Image (tube, helix red, strand yellow):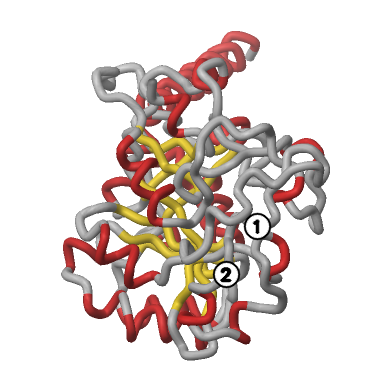
Amino acid sequence: MKKRNRKKRLILLGAFLLFAVAVWLNNTSLFYSNDTDFKVLAHRGLAQTFDVSKVEYDTNTAEVIYPPEHPYLENTLPSIKAAFDHGADIVELDIKLTKDRQLAVFHDFDLAYRTNGKGEVSEYTMEELKELDVGYRYTADEGESYPFRGKGVGLMPSLDEVLAAFPDQSFLIHDKDGELETTKVLWEGYLSNLSKEQLNRITVYGDGAGEGFDYLRSKHEEMKLLTKDMMVSALVMYEVAGWTGYIPKELHNMELHVPLKYAKLLWGWPAKFIDRMESVNTRVVIVEGNGKWSEGFDTKESLEKIPEGYQGYIWTNRVDIITK
């Protein structure tokens, strides 16, 4: 009886070991080439930066910038051009719907945060927004000086200006309104006019799921979309079944923004996971910290955290530093 039980235990142990080896082989990145480097996503082009550890939900980040090291202001044509010139593969930008149903490239809910105007973008026409100074509120010394005041007049672009200026580049468009109306204008007035090749270089993301993203999906099934709810739900499904190599359909045609400390837990991380996502038209971006305040890989030292063999994208606020 003892011999029989021992034999049974050995068979079970052997079966478990074979299963573990099969799972490892199905998810290891050991046999992938490390020749290809990561790619770069520049947040708001080349922008002024600040100490993210001091940011709260209502912080006006224009009023807490570091002493400027470059002349560029976020979400402007010069900052976007500078980011691409420094080697960015994708530039992230923010959009809001104007009074005359155009899409202005601007981040904040109140114009007074960065400009000499006040109120919301939706209360102004694009022509009126062009008269504002987008550098008006920036200060690094609690208001003792305003180094960009007077230098940002006319620099708030419309989305069509951006797409016309950089027709062959890739963009991550942040829908700051989160309203169906804005999403409809984005599709009907902008994205529907792009070629299939151009559209494949565009990702749209927002702060919450809703009618707008359902609308975009109905217009173009292969468009890359991202909301936090979509991403969390899809990755939970992947963690349950991904060890088999199965990719849930919810992960198809997406963009994932994953903090590096969590990305390490994904089946196949890093190279095999990236390969799986690319096979279903999904782009992978890793961010620093917990991803809450757009923390990026902004120093040469931070790049040392990126795992060997990672061939996806990294999020940065200082493309000028990390690509030197």
In the figure, residue 119 lies in which quadrant?
bottom right
Determine the secondary structure under disc 2: loop
Query: Is mark 1 in CB contact (under 8 Å) with mark 2?
Result: yes
Q: Give the residue at mark 1.
A: 136
Q: Residue at horizontal 82%, vertical 50%?
A: 56
Q: Give the residue at mark 2.
A: 132
Q: Is residue 82 left or right of residue 5?
A: left
Residue 181 seen in render: yes
Residue 265 seen in render: no
Which is more toward the observer, 182 or 8?
182
Amino acid tagged 1: Tyr
Which is more toward the observer, 304 or 88?
88
Which is more toward the observer, 307 or 192?
192
Amino acid tagged 2: Leu
Residue 224 lies, with reference to residue 270, above or below; the image says below
The image shows residue 160 at horizontal and vertical percentages of 33, 72
